[in-house]
Image (cartoon, grey):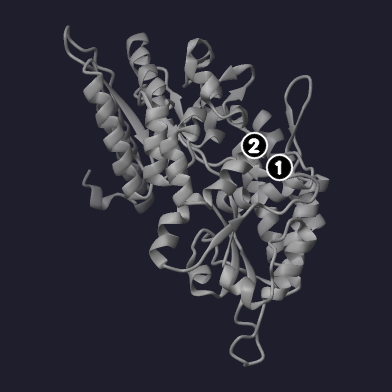
Amino acid sequence: MILSKLPKAIKMQLKLAVSIFLTLNLLILSGCQNTPKNGEPIKITLWHGINPPPNRDVFKTLTDKFNKTHPNIQVEPIYIGQPDQQLPKILTAIVGNAPPDLLWNVATIAGKLAELNAIQPLEKWLDKSPRKAEIYPSLFESMELGGHIWSIPLATNNTGIFYRPSLFKAAGITKVPQNWEQLKQVARSLTRDTNGDGRPDQHGIVLPLGKGEWTVFTWLPFMFSAGGELTAQTAQTPVLHIDNPGSLAALELWSDLLKEGSAILSAPERGYELDNFIAGKVAMQITGPWTLAQLQQSAIDYAVMPIPALKRPAAVVGGENLFLMKTSPERERAAREFLEYAIGEEFQTAWALGTGYLPINLKSRQSQTYQNFVEKNPVLRVFLEQMNSARSRPIISGYSRLSENLGRAIEATLLGRNPQDALKEAQERLTLTLDIAVK
């Protein structure tokens, strides 16, 4: 039968089936695990979403260096899109038995990959490696689940509050806020009508509107600082608690900043953009060290402060981890050699200097080369210090549902919903979705 004569619904189904078939075969062909012939190097693939492009160039240079010093192993880094775009490709490759050898992604995907039996635990290898003692202690929370280590960190960061010293000076502010009440006071003082039209054209802070992971990531330090926890371990499985006192306090803080008129909202799902901060329309913005290159190019004045505390100092670990996919013993051994290289001092120092990420290796952080870099970029000290109190997002299988519902509660609050009602509704929705998933 000629395709053009088929009903529209059937044509769409056929096109979808063909698309899935072609995608699966492409992945199988690109990731197939050919056994190398005697004397040939083992070629392993590493899927990643490193961005912006200059960071990819840094990673490619470091990978090329590994390949030159390990002629029996050749690592091929392949860009497959940003983390939120990768999951369908990863799942297709797993189902088609054609995974990459190594996967770069956020640590929170670990629970799902372990549940799918797609990754190898790493504790036996890491326990024998001298590199284990060199990893930031606070990063192990992003690596461990159920008694196993499922990934290793490639790079790390956290968020602070960047601010414009010139705007602070113009408002008569001499000290950065240390706690939440001071943050609100400073934000009020920085909200000003600078052109005399009777309306504020400069605000104290910009808050990220949206329900995506960026909003959750930048809000979580406030929840942890207020004593909140997202999980509680029971005898069988973790219980997820969106609706907790720390969550309520953090939502009320952001709500108060908006009600007082000292905060404005970003464009939806674009809370990472710095345009208003660079233009001087806002005096403070929550972001991280990856913005240093853009800020330096803008030639504005800037500094950074730790996240103001309520009950305790808090920060949330950012960055991505590397996962060892299940392939074959020979390929896995080769991939582990690259992992050893990636968490070592040499790689981590070069990566930190080239990208602005914080080194995950303690020797790298303490090296004279990196200390010289920090001297030239003193704002990094805030992020390095915050690593001592940084927390990781849960890496449980249900994290995506947790994040989605938490994000919806934050977004609803920013749009005027009562924080307590938003949390209650989000908790009920999360509980329902988890119950359905279990059934």
Image side of residue 218 versus residue 241, left or right: left
Q: Tell me the crowding category of disc 1: few under 14, some 14 to 19, or many 20 or more residues within 10 angstroms, Cα based.
A: many
Name the image quarter holding residue 369: top left
In the picture, the quarter occupied by the N terminus is: top left
Image side of residue 250 versus residue 74, left or right: right
Q: At label 2, which amino acid type do we have?
A: Asn
Mark positioned earlier in the residue sequence (1 or 2):
2
Residue found farthest to the bottom: 197
Q: Position of residue 195 (x, y in %)?
A: 58, 90
In the picture, the quarter occupied by the C terminus is: top right
Q: Position of residue 184 (x, y in %)?
A: 75, 66
Mark 1–mark 2 Cα distance, whole angstroms, equals: 31 Å
* Residue 70 vertical position relative to residue 228 in the rendered view, above or below: above
Q: Position of residue 112 (x, y in %)?
A: 55, 29
Question: Which residue is the site of mark 2?
Answer: 388
Name the image quarter holding residue 209: bottom right
Q: Tell me the crowding category of disc 2: few under 14, some 14 to 19, or many 20 or more residues within 10 angstroms, Cα based.
A: some
Mark 1 falls on what kind of element? helix
Q: At label 1, which amino acid type do we have?
A: Leu
Q: Residue at x 67, y 52 (%)?
A: 307
Question: Which residue is the site of mark 1?
Answer: 430
Mark 2 falls on what kind of element? helix
Q: Residue at x 33, y 15 (%)?
A: 334
Question: Residue 324 versus residue 24: which sits nearer the camera?
Answer: 324
* Residue 160 vertical position relative to residue 366 in the rendered view, above or below: below
Q: Position of residue 36 (x, y in %)?
A: 21, 12
Q: Residue at x 51, y 58 (%)?
A: 272
